[in-house]
Amino acid sequence: MDYSELVYAVERGDMQTANRMCAEAIPILKKYLISKVNASPEDAEDAVQKMFEYVIPKIQNDEITSPSGLLSYMLAGARHSYYKIVRDFDLDKYGEIEEDLVSEADQVWNLVNEEQQTILSRCIEKLKGHYQEMITFLFDHPDADSNEIAEYFDISLNNAWIRKHRVIQQLSDCVQQYF
């Protein structure tokens, strides 16, 4: 997605457009941090907020030289903000925070896993029939090698290897579209 419009909106003082563009970017940036650096949703939100506190003044001071590259700049800035949050976390306060937790930590990861499973299911449904069968087999038999795949589907060894890698690549490409 091109966020050069955000640069132009901030430069013109068009806060309505800038706010709309920031609101559109927040979920994308949060999902990026959650999926790529294993950030918690709360830390991801904090990191994105800190990134905007850094980027908006840069735009206002005309320090962004490539508006079309703003998304890449924001992703890197959010990632660095997250790392700074993690680095500056005071471990002495962890005991106090841990006592205040209302839910078990697994609940958050269950939600993340549930979202990932939903995305995976959607992507599997988009695959052609023989690829759906192949990926189902691979999930049921994760340690299966090309010989076992060839035998199960009654295809050549070379064809088994090619199909396996094609279906994994198609599934991977589809999943990446959601993040």
Image (cartoon, grey):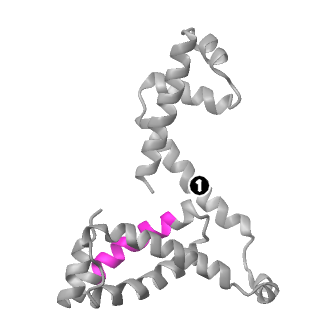
Exactly how many numbered labels are in the figure?
Answer: 1
Q: Amino acid at mark 1?
A: Glu
From this viewpoint, which residue is outermost toward the left? 12
Residue drawn where x is 25% and y is 79% of the image? 7
Verify whether residue 23 appears in magenta. Answer: yes
Q: Position of residue 25 (x, y in %)?
A: 37, 72
**135 or 73, which lies in front?**
73
Q: Position of residue 72 (x, y in %)?
A: 38, 66
**Mark 1 closeness class: few <14, some 14–19, many ≥20 residues within 10 Å:** few
Vertical side of 133 occupied by 14: above or below? below
Q: Quadrant of the N terminus?
A: bottom left
Quarter occupied by residue 83? bottom right
**Above or below 123: residue 118:** below
Residue beneath the point at 53% across and 67% down: 33
Q: Is residue 94 magenta?
A: no
Q: Over which residues does the magenta segment extend?
A: 19-32
- The x, y position of residue 143, in whole percent, is 71, 29
Q: Main secondary structure of the magenta part?
A: helix
Q: Which residue is mark 1?
A: 114
Q: What residue sits 61% from the left and 81% below the top? A: 85
Q: Is residue 154 left or right of residue 174?
A: right
- As helix, strand or loop, the secondary structure at mark 1 comes to helix
Choose top left, top right, bottom left or bottom right for residue 110: bottom right
Residue plotted at (26% across, 65% down):
2
Name the side, left or right, on which 123 lies relative to 71: right
Instruction: State the image coordinates of residue 47 (x, y, percent, origin top left).
Output: 52, 79
Query: Which quadrant is home to the C terminus?
Result: bottom left
Quarter of the image where one finds residue 21: bottom left
Is the residue 135 above or below the residue 13 in the image? above
